[in-house]
Amino acid sequence: MAMIDAIMKTNEAYVASEGMKYAKEDPAVAKLPAKHLAIVTCMDTRLVNMMENAMGLQRGDANVIKVAGNVIEPFGDVMRSILVSVYELGANEVIVVGHDGCGMEKTTAASLADKMKQRGIDAEAIADVYATLERWADSFTCAHLNVEKAVQVLRAHPLLSKDISISGCIMNPATGELTKIDTI
C-alpha cells in the first residue's frame, strides 16, 4: 500500500473522532496567527511537533514556514510566504529557527546532482539548474551561520517593514532547547 493510502485511512478515522472534536471545541481558531508570529524553520522530521511544543505554541498561534535548512532567498517562495504572513495575516514578528545537525550542512550541489543522475534525471536538465543549486545548497555550511544570514536577509529586505521584530535561534533536536543567536 502506498503511504497516501495509509494516510487517507488514518485521516478518515481521525475526522470521525478527533476532527469533530476540534470543530465543536474550537470553531473560532482563525487563519490569522493569534500571536502575530511567523516562524521560518527547517523541514527536518525531528522538529515536527517538538518545535511548537518547545516554543509553547498551540494550533492557530503562528504561521510556520518550513523549508530545507530554513534558507531564505530574497525574492523566493519563503520570502513571499513571510510577506503574506506580515501584510495579509498580521504577523509583526519573524523568528528564524535553525537546528543543530542540519542535513543541509552536508548537502551540496554536486551531491544533489549525483543523486538526481542516479534516479534517472537527464544531465542536461541538471546542468540547466546547476548554478541555482550551487547558490542555494553550497552556501549553507553551518546552521548557526545560516540563521544569522537569514536574519540579515530579512532585516535588509526592501519589502519588509522595519517595525517587524526579527530574531533567530538554534534548536537542539534531541532536547528542544533553544539558544537565541545574539550576534545578529
Image (spheres, helix red, strand yellow):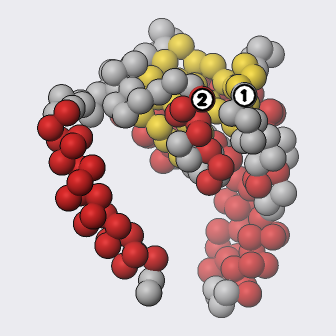
Across and down, in percent, residue 18 comes to 27, 49
The image quadrant where one finds the C terminus is top right
Identify the residue at image location x=80%, y=33%: 144
Across and down, in percent, residue 54 comes to 60, 29
Give left or right: position of 92 versus 147.
left
**Number of other residues with Cα within 10 Å of mark 2, as a class: few under 14, some 14 to 19, many 20 or more:** some
Q: Which residue is mark 2?
A: 54
Nearer to us in this view, 123 or 51: 51
Secondary structure at badge 1 equals: loop
Residue 126: mark in rendering? none
Question: Which image quadrant for residue 73?
Answer: top right
Secondary structure at badge 2 equals: helix
Identify the residue at image location x=70%, y=53%: 136
Question: Which image quadrant for residue 131?
Answer: bottom right
Q: CA distance from mark 2 to mark 1?
A: 7 Å
Amino acid type, callout 2: Ala
Amino acid type, callout 1: Glu
The image quadrant where one finds the N terminus is bottom left
Q: Is residue 140 visible?
A: no
Q: Farthest top residue?
A: 163
Check contact, mark 2 vs mark 1: CB within 8 A.
yes
Nearer to us in this view, 18 or 70: 18
Question: Which image quadrant for residue 96?
Answer: top right
**Number of other residues with Cα within 10 Å of mark 1, as a class: few under 14, some 14 to 19, many 20 or more:** some
Q: Height in image: 49 above or below 127? A: above
Nearer to us in this view, 159 or 47: 47
Give left or right: position of 31 versus 148.
left
Residue 177: mark in rendering? 1
Across and down, in percent, residue 90 comes to 33, 21
